[in-house]
Amino acid sequence: MKNSINLFYDKKGKEPISMLTCYDYSTAKFLDESEVDAILVGDSLGMVFQGNNDTIPVTVDEMIYHTKAVRKGCPNKFLVIDMPFLSYHITKEDAIRNSGRVIKETGANAVKVEGGAEIIDKIRGLLDAKIPVLGHLGLTPQSVNVFGGFKIQGKSFENAKKIIEDALLLEKEGVFAIVLEGIPEKLAKFITEKLKIATIGIGAGRYTDGQILVINDIFGMYKDMMPKFVKKFGNVGEEMQRSIGGYVTEVKGKQFPEEKHTFAIEDDIIEKLKKEF
């Protein structure tokens, strides 16, 4: 496999791992031609594509729909799919059934689940079923109602201790890497140095083994929320707005379409049609 689970093991402590989210075929085509290491079809699509306030409403069917489109656009990249809220929380059997379904139907290489000790039996079941698992600790968006919002985690001793214990537990069980989201930089550094598996940071500072961001954020396309840890690497949103404005202006001014945008037909055919009708 051109890009396999081994890249996370091989690059640990040697070369930073780059990941981005993606939700559609057209964008996936660009990513497939890039040097990005891996792609996540995140349940963040609930916010950036569906306009929800959080990721809670996203369903398994919706994740499958988007991941199938992304896989068609990026056949050469390691692809991870987020398991949405309540798709793996209730029973181990549910977790295996839902995760197995998304792997079979989408061609994704692995699933990502949020949580530590409280879902360890589900993670163990997935791994026993030969489904690779990417862990996710810290600010886990599916727990937004428990956290009381999108709040930085791991700032107290007890909370930081819990995240460390969960990270060590996930490593012991066999996850291939862990996303650390929304935690203090020094805590992320401490965890990264403790683990033999890779850490992927989002809002976790400079010392994780890799980074991931929402692609709409780096393009400057999503204005509803701009966390401190996000950096815009482009102004695609502004260019889209400019293009839309230009289109509307030319349509109203009858400047578009021009003759070069049209298709021809023989005049005698038009004359025959006039006589017919």
Image: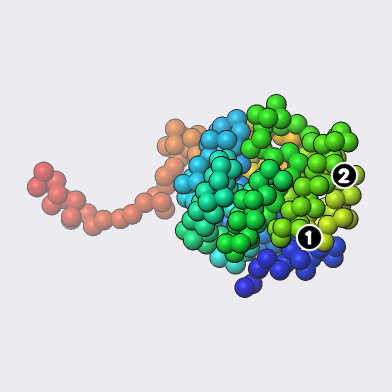
Secondary structure of the residue carrying tag 1 is loop
Q: Which image quadrant for residue 13?
A: bottom right
Residue beneath label 2, please?
187
Disc 1 versus disc 2: distance between alpha carbons? 16 Å
Q: In the orientation shown, which residue stands out farthest toward the top? A: 148
- Amino acid type at image mark 1: Ile
Residue beneath label 1, please?
197
Q: Position of residue 148 (x, y in %)?
A: 70, 26
Q: In the orientation shown, which residue stands out farthest toward the bottom? A: 1
> At 53% from the left edge and 39% from the top edge, which residue is drawn?
58
> At 67% from the left edge and 49% from the top edge, which residue is drawn?
120
Q: Earlier in the sequence, mark 1 or mark 2?
A: 2
Q: How many marks?
A: 2
Q: Position of residue 103 (x, y in %)?
A: 53, 59
Q: Is residue 64 above or below residue 247?
A: below
Closer to the camera in the image, 230 or 104? 104
Label 2: how many residues lie within 10 Å, few (<14), some (14-19) or many (20+)?
A: many
Q: Quadrant of the N terminus?
A: bottom right
Q: Position of residue 46 (x, y in %)?
A: 56, 38
